[in-house]
Image (cartoon, rainbow, N blue to C red):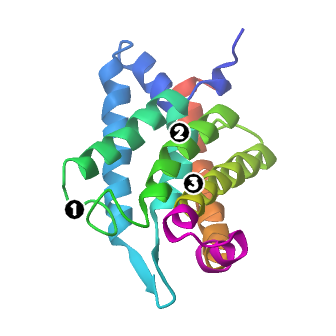
């Protein structure tokens, strides 16, 4: 039997609102919109075509808050917007060097959603989000390595290592966002 604390926010909101699936869908659309906004908060780095953005923070929080099913749907919506040609990515297209990272968003959100819930212990939140970040790196750097035909060491130096400090800060911020929303979560879950 599942504990109420193990239910993700979108499921709890759906229960509060007469079990309407559309509530979860609206929250998922909101996270897709936040991912679009996160793409526009970017810092270009002179040595790589991949900018620093707030997107990974959104991906990590969405996994915890929405759970695997709705987080995957949310990231899929974002990819659908990009595939439709809308300027929602850092490069303005679904192709190119950032494609692997974008695919990694879907896998990472799902993995984080499987591994953690808003009321999870701090260590579980951090571990789940670190795993999600690793998935994004694996997909993104792996894609670039295939495109450029570079060796693993060169890919790590150019597309992973420079991003680690910023992503550690975004992971900490994502944990903070989830923890800050915990009182609301507990109110909705009746705990």
Q: What residue sits right under mark 2 in the picture? A: 65
Rendered image: mark on residue 112: none
Q: Which residues are magenta?
A: 144-160
**Nearest to viewer (mark 3 / mark 1):** 3
Q: What residue sits right under mark 1 in the picture? A: 87
Rendered image: mark on residue 139: 3
| Along the viewing direction, whichever of 158 and 172 lies nearer the viewer | 158
Horizontal relation, residue 74 to residue 108: left or right: left
Quarter of the image with the C terminus in it: top right
Q: Secondary structure at mark 1?
A: loop
Main SS of the magenta segment? helix
**Nearest to viewer (mark 3 / mark 2):** 3
Precedes in sequence: disc 3 or disc 1: 1
| Along the viewing direction, whichever of 122 and 134 lies nearer the viewer | 134
Q: Residues within 10 Å of mark 1 (few under 14, many from 20)?
A: some
Q: Position of residue 59 (x, y in %)?
A: 50, 51
| Along the viewing direction, whichever of 122 and 159 lies nearer the viewer | 159
Circles 2 and 1 in contact, beta carbons < 8 Å: no
- Residue 121: image quadrant is top right
For residue 62, above or below residue 187:
below
Q: Position of residue 44 (x, y in %)?
A: 42, 83
Exactly how many numbered labels are in the figure?
3
């Amino acid at each position: 039997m599942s504990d109420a604390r193990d239910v993700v926010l979108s499921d709890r909101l759906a229960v509060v609102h007469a079990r309407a699936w559309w509530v979860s869908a609206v929250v998922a659309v909101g996270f897709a919109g936040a991912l679009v906004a996160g793409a526009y908060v970017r810092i270009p780095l002179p040595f790589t075509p991949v900018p620093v953005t707030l997107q990974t923070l959104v991906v990590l929080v969405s996994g915890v808050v929405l759970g695997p099913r709705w987080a995957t749907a949310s990231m899929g919506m974002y990819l659908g917007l990009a595939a439709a040609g809308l300027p929602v990515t850092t490069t303005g297209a679904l192709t190119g060097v950032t494609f692997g990272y974008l695919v990694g968003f879907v896998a990472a959100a799902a993995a984080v959603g499987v591994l953690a819930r808003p009321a999870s212990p701090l260590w579980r939140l951090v571990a789940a989000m670190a795993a999600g970040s690793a998935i994004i790196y694996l997909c993104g750097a792996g894609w670039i390595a295939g495109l450029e035909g570079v060796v693993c060491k060169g890919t790590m130096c150019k597309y992973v290592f420079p991003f680690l400090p910023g992503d550690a800060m975004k992971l900490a911020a994502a944990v903070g966002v989830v923890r800050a929303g915990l009182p609301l979560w507990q109110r909705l879950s009746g705990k």
